[in-house]
Image (cartoon, coloured by chain):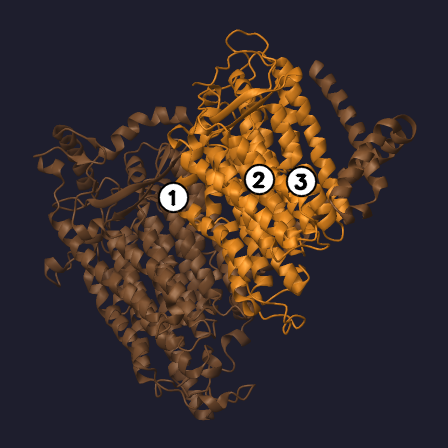
Amino acid sequence: MNSLLASMAPLLAEAPTGPPSVTNDANWFLENAWLIPLLPALSFVLILFFGKRMPKKGAEIGIAAVGLAFVLAVITGFAWIDHRDNFEPAGTGGEEALVIGDDGLTSSDSLVLTAEDGGEGEKGGEEEGPVPVAVQSSTQWFQSGGIEFNVGILVDGLAVMMLFVVTLISLLVHVYSTDYVGGDRRYTHFFAFLSLFTASMLFFVLSDNILQMIVGWELVGVCSFVLIGHWWEEKPNSDAALKAFITNRVGDVGLIVGVITLFFAAGGGKTFDTLLINNAIVRGEVGKTALVVAAAALMAAVMSKSGQFILHTWLPDAMAGPTPVSALIHAATMVVAGIYMVARLYPVFYEGMQINGSSINLLATVGAITLVFGGLLAFVQDDIKKVLAYSTISQLGYMAMALGVGAWTAAVFHLFTHAFFKANLFLGSGSVAHSVHSFDMKKDMGGLRKFMPKTYITFIIGSLALAGVFPLAGFWSKDEILVGTGGWNFFGGTGGNGAYTFHLTMGMIGAALTAGYMTRCVYLTFHGEYRGGHAADDGAEAHHGDPHESGPRILVPLYILSGFAILAGLLNMPKGLALWPDSWEERFGHYIEPLGASYFPGISHGTPSYSLAIVSSLIAFAGAGYAFYYYFVKVDRLAKKTGVSLTGMPNGVTTTNPVARVGHKVLVEKYYLDHLYNGVIVAFTKGPLARAAYWVNQNVIDGGVDAVGRASVKSGRFVYDTIDQGVIEGVVNGSGKVSDATGEELRHLNSGKVQNYAAIMFAAAALLAGSFIILLAL
Amino acid sequence: MDTLDTNNWLPTLLVFAPLAGALLMALVPEKEEETHKALALLTSLVTFGLAVFLFIDFDYDQSGALQYLVDTDWIEVIGAGYTMGIDGMSLPLIGLTVLVMPLVFVYSWDHIPSPGNTKAFMMLMLILETGMIGTFVAQDLILFFVFFEVVLLPMFFMIAVWGGEDRRYASLKFFLYTLFGSALMLLSFLALFFLAKDPATGELLRTFNMPALADSAGEGIVRSTQLVIFGGMFIGFGVKVPIFPFHTWLPDAHTQAPTQGSVILAAVLLKLGTYGFIRIAIPFLPEAAEAWAPVIGAVAVIGIIYGALGCLAQTDMKRLIAFSSIAHMGFVMLGIATLTDFGINAAIYGMVAHGLITGMLFFIAGSVKERYHTLEIKRLGGMLVQAPRLGWILGFVTMASLGLPGLAGFWGEFPAILSAYNPAGAISEELFRGYMVVAAIGTVLAAGYLLWLLQRTAMGEPSAEFADDPNITDVSTFEWVAWTPFLILIVVFGVAPGLIFEVTDPAVVQSLNECLKTTCEVGASVVAGG
């Protein structure tokens, strides 16, 4: 390994001083952003040890810590805006030498590098003014085998955006939970792990190296395990928790292999530093094969963590956890980790997947398939949370696809807007479930708009935003993704990195599906007549009475999230459509996207187009319209006529048409993937394979050992009886003495056996010694 | 080789303090059980105190050098010397030993296994401690061999007398299997004695002195002979680790041993084998090590997968943990097989982490057995309801065992996998990258068997059989005292891996022959620097 390090030395001497992608001299809040994960981490420890003794059972600690973290995140956000607008790296000013890290460069050197780098930036994009300069503060963690392991933070637009989203959603979830899980048997424990979950995600987001990312990634995973299995008394819940963890472990194999490959191929076997690795890839110093391997391996990690087809199956089951946890997992702390990782290590995927100038690649295609297949599954769910879960899978598919086609900002922006409306919808479904004590839309819901008008309105807002209705948040981000595919060239080309027409088509189908399943969900939950309130098996109905509106600790988070769901899209209005002042355009992209920085590939942007926006909106309306016609007109009319609250037409197409019936069955069975995983792969490993291995162990390997033992006993007895009695006698006496010393029990040992074995020992040793000496002599 | 010989009484004292305690106990009548418990605990605490002095006094800037070196004649007639010393490679393992023993004695305070006889039980454990520490400080092959064998007998009796149903079979198997390995190991040592040459003069060394043999590094021994000698040590140490396919004594020994025996076996005894590899086999015969590396790597990754599959087939909690040891030691062996400083550092980390984590798992298994009188997984369940703290500790240790970052297990596992990407010298990269992927897949299986164990024992509602059993109580005071240091260290070593890596690193670098950086060829081996 050392020789390799030596050969990498020139590269490494150069790397930290390369283009001015990073600084360690910035606003205090940017340099000390590590405080943000630290606060909830401390809160975890405090709640764990003192929570039960607090008047609010620990919830107040969690809320205070996360609230403070949120305030810090907001300040950090403003600090970043200021930094982005005003920070001129010393090198570009040409006044003083650029000093970054340990090595200094002369100003002329750094000027050259900057000029080159600026050139690349111009080529790729349309940014003007100062290039984005990330803020990194890092310290050595430990050292082993000549490799330094650092721990540190990397703050740039992407990280700052995530800090805001995570702390905001987490804060709202904390507040909401004080009501939602109030009186729970493990209330304190629940809050402790909410804090740890938040801290882990923030730690992951701020990681400045890929090893640290693994740590955050896994901690997020274990927190989700604990929270999904919060009610572990019931087996389905612990099953769901195990499934989540083990499925993610499958992806982690990819993560481990990918990180190791990057460490050696791009980090020179010397560094895990994200920026250095990205820099090396952008500069084209990394071999193609290694990048393809790394990108493909990391892809597996993304598929498991971010619920991409075919490793998404844990995500719907994870609904077994309390609803606030679902909101947190789906909006902020877990599933977006995979998307974030791709965005953070974008050069790996941009080069490894060969995104530029292509029309197909693994990442984009997996995303496209996920967004359609996930959307289809949402149609056959009766559980409101499962509708939302498949919706998340579908939306994550959009994000993955966007990253796959090179629309980095669109993906990240969709992550941002999706966080608000999906958290809104999940918390809304929790508000409903809190009231009707069930998640089953068909059995226990219906007509709830009358009972819970406030929840209803926020849910409608979330649904419209998710469906991508103008001018709500989802419209803007989804439109950007479709633009970014570069596949829309009927009315003048749209630029982008390639012509991803297939992906554009899938995205449009997804838009129709999204609008359709949300219409169905809204109808089944809030419209028609209330179907709940029937006597439960255990007669628990007496407590319940009519559904009621939730209290302020549930509603206020819903209002806030609805506000974001309406407005968040305005942060990144497309350029060049002349409907609004230039200064409103692409604010999000300007501050978040690091185009022009040395650690970011020179991606191209698509050109927004009215025609695409209108066509995709029409398609979404068509999807919503069909579902609307089916439920709000046909089903509703029949329901009124018969006086029964219906959840579908009695003779729908799935009962009359054989093809549709098969299709419906495939969807209900979730493409049979669970059967494949649980019934085939897991069952085979746990059952026949493990049993076979154990059988071999007991009967072949150990059997061999026993056979040798038995044979030795026989030959030993022979030796003992005939030849060596005198010698053995002494040994027996010796062991007899030891037996006396160690107490009564030893007397029960079969002394005959000891003799036999002693004999074998000598015989075997003699035999071995002989053969060994013969071997040596050869 | 650099050596420091101030305070050189320390290794001797460390090694023989437990033995002195055992002798003292021999004078006290068997009836006075409390006295025996106190004496044994006190002895182990004194040893711990000596080790604390060692840890303070140790010169960490020179942890690559052998410190506290004693080197006097012992058995002149066979050229065996009384040579002892401590460097960064042995220090963490000594620390592990002296820490585990007092905690085992604390635990034993109210957990003396049937059929009693506190005196003999405690004395055996003290003798065991002498043997273990002795193995880690010995710098002479004969001395090493003696200590290596000293641990055999007490463990044999612990299993044979205080063990479970099938204790006789298990104890004899343990004893004979290990002895079989030792025989080959001894022959290899003898071969080294007769064949090793001084690298400078080319004369025969005729010594058992370990630093001298490491300097000689197989110089002048024909390659094929080197391979055979290494093979002898491979089996000798490999049985002790145990590596596949020499592992079958382990599940039986673990399952039958009393809790204390299992803990010591898992925490320290298995490390004698891996320590032998990095202290003796690799430095003495680097060329042969390079040739053997693909085999070691192969049995390592087979062990990872095979051990995990064995776990999945188990119905007994203790036997499952025993099989998990095989899988975990596979990661340690994979790190060793790379012959890189990074990989061997990871291996030492893995040894310490496995000692803490699996030792802790066996403690829990012992306490479960005591409460439920069974370890049959399908009869257990709902531990989190009946004994919530015990359940949570099991959950925590399970997470540590499956290699969760932030806890100790991760730093043995991930760096070992990492090091396999780029093995030393002329070892095939393609092959080891294959091993890397297999080992990574092993982590999935680890999550599987450990979480299934957790789910079936701790989660859910208690079974009807035990629902109202008054025996099922939460963690007792003695258990807390014995376990808390384990739990704390699992976190500490998870958060601050430098605590071990930075101690072992210089010693590991020192132990690796220069030739491993390029390729080890016959006649071209360069003597280790320093």
Q: Amino acid at mark 3?
A: His
**Nearest to the observer: residue A124 or residue B39:** B39
Query: What residue is rendered at 49% in x and 89% in y?
Result: A541
- Which of the two discs, 2 and 3, labels the residue nearer the N terminus? 3
Horizontal and vertical percent position of residue B166: 76, 50
The chain to which mark 3 is attached is B
Q: In the rendering, what colour is chain A?
A: brown
**Nearest to the observer: residue B260 or residue B232:** B260
- Separation of marks 2 and 1 at Cα, in angstroms: 22 Å
Query: What residue is rendered at 43% in x and 61% in y?
Result: A224
Q: Amino acid at mark 2?
A: Gly
**Residue for badge 3:** B247
Horizontal and vertical percent position of residue A698: 73, 45
- What mark, if any, has residue B330 been given in the picture? 2
**Residue for badge 1:** A211
As drawn, is A202 to the left or to the right of A22? right
Badge 3 marks a residue whose secondary structure is loop
Neighbour tally class for label 3: few under 14, some 14-19, many 20 plus, Cα within 10 Å: many
Q: In the rendering, what colour is chain B?
A: orange
- What mark, if any, has residue B169 been given in the picture? none
Q: Amino acid at mark 1?
A: Leu
